Image: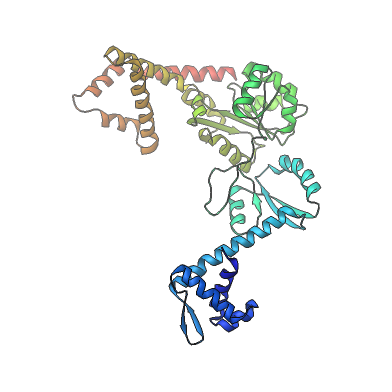
Amino acid sequence: MNYHELKYILCIAKYQNLTKAAQELYISQPTLTKHLQKLEREMGTKLFSRSGNSYTPTFAGRKYMEYARKILQIQQDWEKELKDLTENNEGELNVAFPLMRSTCMVPQIMTSFFQKYPKVKVNILEEAYSIQEKLLLNDQLDFGIFNEVHKHPKLEYELLKKEEIMGAEIFEAARKNVAQKFEIEVTDDNKKLATESEIIVLSVKPQFYVEVIEEIRPIISKDTIVLTIAPGFSLDKLAGLFAKGQKIIRAMPNTPALIGEGMTAVCPNKNITADEMEWIKKLLASCGRVEVVKEYMMDAVVSASGSAPAYVYIMIEAMADAAVMDGMPRAKAYQFAAQAVVGAAKMVLETGKHPAELKDAVCSPAGTTIEAVRVLEEKGFRSAIIEAMRACADKSHRMA
C-alpha cells in the first residue's frame, strides 16, 4: 500500500484543484496527475469528476477517502506507539484503578515503572468501572484496570495475570493441588497472606476460626475486608475476635457456586462502605446470584439456600429410584429428574409466578400429576421439608 497516494487523494479533495494540491504536497502537477490516473486505472473507477480545473469526488472517491483517513490514522497511531516503545519519552500517563485497589497494586508496580520510564509522570485515579469506561471513551484515560466482564465494543481489553489471588493451606499436597488447578500462589503462611491481601476469605472449618483469627489479628490492616462463610459466627462475635474497626462481611454461599449457579447471602458490618459492598457483590456474582440481607435472616438463609442442595439431591435420588422401578435406566433417570428440577427452578425465577400457580398449571383435572401431588400431601412431603428446614435453621442459631 502506498501511503503517499492516500495523502495525494485527500489533498486533491481538500482543494478540488490539482495545482493547489501539488503545491501543498511539494510535488509537480504532472507527477500528481500521473499518480491519480494510475490509481484510477488500478481501481477501475473514477475517483473525481472533472469540470475545467475543478475536481469533485465521486461516490467511489468519497468512500475511498473515508477508508484512506482511517488507514492514515492507524499508521499515525502505530508510529506514535512504536516511538513510545522504542524511546524513553517524556509525558503523562493517566491510569485508573478500581476503588480500593491502588493501595495494593500501585506500590508493587510503580517502583519498577519509574526505573524504566523516569521522565513519565503518572496520574492515578480510583474510580468505579462505569466512570472508568466513560473516561476511556472520552480519551481522558490511557488505560484502566477493573474487574468487570462486560466489554464495550469501542475499547480494547487484555486479561491480566492471576497474580493478585493467593491462598493459604497447611497441607503440602493440598497446596500443590490448588496451585496447579487455579494457577495461583498458595502459601502455608497465614500471616503472609494477611499482610498482602485486600480481601481475606476466611473459609476454614468453624472449629479453627478462633485459632486462625488469633494468628492474623495482630498484623491485619483495618482496611482489609474479612469475608467469612462459616455459620454460627455473628458479626458481633467476629468483631470481638478482631481488632476494633475491622471491616467484616458475613457470607453464606452454597455448593452450586462451584459451577456458577450459586446463591449467596451477604451481610456487612457498619465499617463496610457502599462502594466496598458493591465490589464484594460483583466478586461473588461470578459464582451466581448475590443478595444483601439483614443479619437476623442468616439462619433462614442457611436452611433455605446454604443446606438446600442436600434436600434437592435426596429428592432427585428418590425420583430416579422411582423411575428405575418403572423401567428407566438409572443414568437416564438421574438426567430426567435433575433436568426437571432445573427447569422448574428456572420457571420460578424467570416467570415471576407463584410456585402454587405453576404447580396448578401442570395439574390437569383427573390427571396423573394431581394424583402424585395428592400422595405427596398425604405422606407429609410439604411438612417434612418445612420441619427439616426449621431444624436446620435452629441448629444454625444454636451454633452462634
Would residue 258 be found to the left or right of residue 313 on screen? right
- The residue at 51%/69% (across/down) is 65
Quadrant where the N terminus is found in the figure: bottom right
- The residue at 62%/43% (across/down) is 275
136 shown above or below 33 = above
x and y percentages locating residue 300 in the rendered image: 50, 25
| Residue ranking furthest to the top | 325
Would residue 271 be found to the left or right of residue 116 on screen? left
Residue 210 in view:
yes
x and y percentages locating residue 66 in the rendered image: 51, 67
9 shown above or below 294 = below
Q: Quadrant of residue 286?
A: top right
90 shown above or below 109 = below
Residue 380 in view:
no
**How many marks overall?**
0
Quadrant where the C terminus is found in the figure: top right
x and y percentages locating residue 62 in the rendered image: 48, 71
Q: Quadrant of residue 317?
A: top left
x and y percentages locating residue 84 in the rendered image: 71, 55
